[in-house]
Amino acid sequence: MGEAIGFIGVGAMGGPMCKRLIGAGYEVTAFDPNSSALDVIVSAGAKRAGSTRELADSVEVIFVSLPTPPIVKAVAEEAMQGSKLKLLIDLSTTGPRAAQDIGEMLNSNGVEMLDSPVSGGVGGAEKGTLAVMVSGPEAHWEKWKPALQAIGHNAFFVGETQGHGQMMKLINNLLSATAMVASAEAFALGAKAGLDPDVMVNVINAGSGANTAVRDKFPKSILTRTFDYGFRTELMYKDVKLCLEEAEAMGTPMWVGQPVKQWWSLALARGGVTEDFSNIMRYVEEQAGVEVRTRKNDPKP
Ligand code: NAD
């Protein structure tokens, strides 16, 4: 049997990442207050923990994948009281200042941290192709590299400065969020001008406008009108907001970032916290007075 580890937060991302660790031979014990999410992981071979504290009393290393910085902090606070815990590996997106704050809190209680946010969506988590951006003590990176590579074969060590992995992630996601709204505007214009959205996807993906929104999100969840990509609008908004806060704190202009945030703010206000972020297209369509959908299933004239 492989090394014993803990995993907390087995949701859209945490579930498949946890399964990859089980598949890589780790002996995983998991906790999530959502019992149906936990059931899935237990049937994939994990042991069930009754609470964060119970888990931190039984393993030295815990991975977490949780929605927001306050939740990560609350879970870390409970975990550091555990009698066995020595290292927390945070796969969530929290932003650098939260990572530094949580890291200091853990350190003063004898627990170390790697902040290791991920990029690549639920599909990447299932396939193990995520980009993982790791910062913290290098010795822990060396030791846990095989596990982090099981989660994402593109695992990068960003440096020892706590929070640099998070900074990297916010920059990446600002670009991803920008590509999504800019592409939504561009597709609304094209559809209104009479272009076929499927043709637009093919051309842009072969041309210099290529980006991950047009490559992955438009064909899978927008043109099909399924709006089910697997990332909630509230999380996209959180990432953009955290990035702009960092830019402001550092006196770095982000003039393009401001209207990008406005779009996500509108999507959040309209769609609420549980809606998938691909619905941004519907709010752009409302402004443009057009619908962007595949014509593949249309009856032949
Ligand atoms: P999710 O809501 O699907 O999963 C989070 C899980 O945490 C849920 O199962 C929830 O029950 C659990 N949880 C909540 N509060 C808890 C607590 N106090 N103790 C223990 N467990 C608790 O969210 P997700 O989409 O999996 O995102 C997780 C993190 O990964 C976020 O920080 C997000 O920004 C980041 N992320 C998500 C994606 C994506 O495509 N979904 C991609 C990259 C990064």
Image (spheres, rainbow, N blue to C red):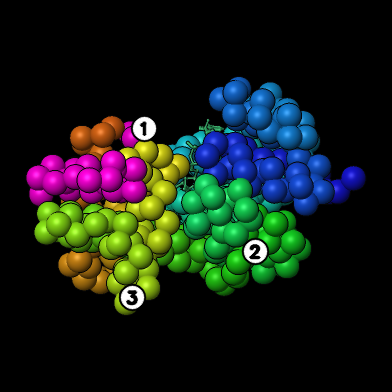
Using the numbered discs, state the Cα–Cα distance from disc 1 to disc 3 in whole angstroms.
34 Å
Number of disc labels: 3
Q: Is residue 47 magenta?
A: no
Q: Residue furthest front?
A: 301
Q: Position of residue 55 (x, y in %)?
A: 71, 33
Q: Position of residue 108 (x, y in %)?
A: 60, 50
Residue nearest the observer in this picture, 180 or 150: 180
Secondary structure type for disc 2: loop
Residue 153's disc is 2
Residue 274's disc is 1
Residue 207's disc is 3
Q: Residues within 10 Å of mark 3 (few under 14, many from 20)?
A: few
Q: Amino acid at mark 2?
A: His
Q: Amino acid at mark 3?
A: Gly
Using the numbered discs, state the Cα–Cα distance from disc 3 to disc 2 in whole angstroms.
27 Å
Secondary structure type for disc 3: loop
Quadrant of the image occupied by residue 48 = top right
Q: Is residue 133 above or below residue 274?
A: below
Using the numbered discs, state the Cα–Cα distance from disc 1 to disc 2 in whole angstroms.
29 Å
Q: Amino acid at mark 1?
A: Thr
**Is residue 249 visible in the rendered structure shown here?**
no
Residue nearest the observer in this picture, 51 or 189: 189
Q: Is residue 170 above or below residue 262?
A: below
Magenta range is 273-301
Residue 215's disc is none
Q: Residue at x 51, y 36 (%)?
A: 74
Quadrant of the image occupied by residue 251 = bottom left
Quick check: 80 left or right of 123? right
**Is residue 66 visible in the rendered structure shown here?**
yes
* Some atom of ligand 1 lies within 8 Å of the CB belonging to the residue at label 1: no
Q: Is residue 209 above or below residue 50?
A: below
